[in-house]
Image (cartoon, rainbow, N blue to C red):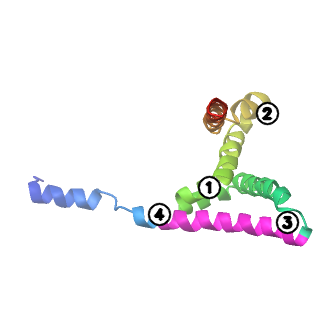
Amino acid sequence: MKYNKDNYQQVVDEITPKNKMLKNCIMAFIFGGAICVIGEFINDSFVSWLGITEDEASPMTSVVLVGISALLTGLGWYDKLGKIGGAGTVVPITGFANSVVSPALEFKREGYVLGTAANIFKLAGPVLLFGYLSSFVAGLLSMAFR
């Protein structure tokens, strides 16, 4: 079949995937917001039901969110949520837990030392490195401009 400009453009339009940016943004907003609402619910539960102070409840909430995220990753559900929610599931604390647990599961069959332990921070390592580095630089700048 010979293509001219019109036929070629028609074939390109049929083959090119449709832009789903608006849908992806909406789903990220919904899922990210839902994760944050769950976190607020957990935090408020610690404060109101257990009588814990706000300062003590915040880190406990982070631990619970990391635990839930790690559990969902281990069960294979977090990846399914990620396919639907996109960037909304990369809310820092839950996305970080997922990025630590995923390689641990992936390399488990290579052994606990050379597999899991050696590769557990493969995805999260750069995040930790740049987080520590930026904190160090911010601390130096803070000390310099006092």
Chief secondary structure of the magenta portion: helix
4 or 1: tag closer to the N-terminus: 4
Q: Assign a secondary structure to mark 2.
A: helix
Extreme residue in the front direction: 146
Q: Which amino acid does label 2 sit on?
A: Tyr
Which residues are the magenta region?
26-49
Q: How far apart are marks 3 and 1 (CA)?
A: 21 Å
Are the two marked residues, 4 and 1, in contact with CB atoms closer than 8 angstroms?
no
The crowding category of the residue bearing disc 1, from other C-alpha atoms within 10 Å (few below 14, some 14 to 19, many at least 20), is some
Which residue is located at x 65 percent, y 57 percent?
A: 78
What's the residue at 65%, 39% (across, down)? 124
The residue tagged 3 is 46
Residue at image x 85%, y 67%?
47
Residue 62 in percent (x, y) is at: 76, 54
Q: Mark 4 points at which residue?
A: 25
| Cα distance between the residues tagged 1 and 2 | 28 Å
78, 44: nearer the viewer = 44
Q: Which of marks 3 and 1 is nearer the N terminus?
A: 3
* CA distance separating discs 4 and 1: 14 Å
Going by the picture, which residue comes out furthest to the bottom?
A: 49
